[in-house]
Image (cartoon, rainbow, N blue to C red):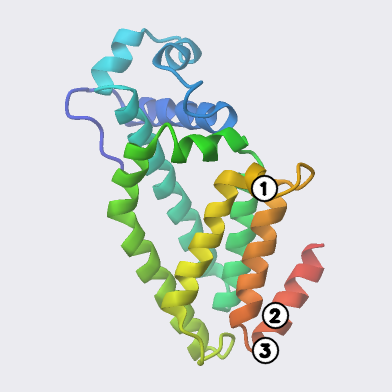
Amino acid sequence: MDELPISTHIPKETYNRILETVFKSLRERGFKATTMDSIATQLSMSKRTLYEIFENKDHMFVETIKYFHRKFRTVITRIFTQSSTVIEALVKALQYHLSEIKQVNPTFFRDMDNYAKKMRRHYDDRQGEDIDSGMMQILKTGVQQGVFREDVNYRISIRLFNIQMESLKRAEEFFPEDVVISDIYTTLAVNFLRSIATPKGLSIIDDYLKLEN
């Protein structure tokens, strides 16, 4: 359940609309270009009102990222509930995540490492371990279903995958200009799934990707 700042009495719908507006700006323009003034203008709201809701811009960013991670988890939970196997769910989750990444300006990823370091650490310190633990459980279920291999060190594999995903934040340094972030993400994610899949799992991956193509 979303928590409203103690100092305000605005409706939950209004608060969520603010966070939606902030995230849209972050996604399209990056952190530096998203200011309290620009958000207030988009919402037809005074900057003073924003400061009554958030302590400062960093606080607004932290609450926005936390809000969208909760929304993302809700979608992923629904995908896993409605899928017949773990590997089918992961492929669908990959596609959902990809649809989100396609809307993100590369500036967002660069700013996350540079301008917003404090905010990123604040979030990662609380969520990183939980995310890895949840992924471990998902992969163990896949092993039980016969779609993922038993001879894989999943703890290391997850960490290696996360390290590879960090390259998205500096894609312009590591890849040619004609390579887009969405293609990098797809390649990394599909290669990860293929590397841990059993023949049964590979068949499901191939069939599903062919169907989507």
Q: Position of residue 209 (x, y in %)?
A: 75, 68
Which residue does the image show at 48% across and 78% down from the upper left? Answer: 139
Whether tag 3 and tag 2 are in contact, CB under 8 A, the answer is yes
Distance of mark 3 from mark 2, alpha carbons?
7 Å
Q: Is residue 1 visible?
A: no
Q: Quadrant of residue 59?
A: top left
- Would you call the spot at circle 3 few (<14 residues within 10 Å), some (14-19), or many (20 or more)? few
Q: Position of residue 167 (x, y in %)?
A: 57, 53
Whether tag 1 and tag 2 are in contact, CB under 8 A, the answer is no
Describe the element under mark 3 as helix, strand or loop. helix
Whether 120 is drawn above or below 36: the answer is below
- Lower sequence index among marks 1 and 3: 1
Residue marked by disc 2: 204
Of badges 1 and 2, nearer the viewer stands 1
Q: Which mark is residue 200?
A: 3
Residue marked by disc 1: 181
Of badges 1 and 3, nearer the viewer stands 1
Q: Position of residue 186 (x, y in %)?
A: 68, 59
Query: 34 or 39: which is nearer to us?
Result: 34
Describe the element under mark 1 as helix, strand or loop. helix
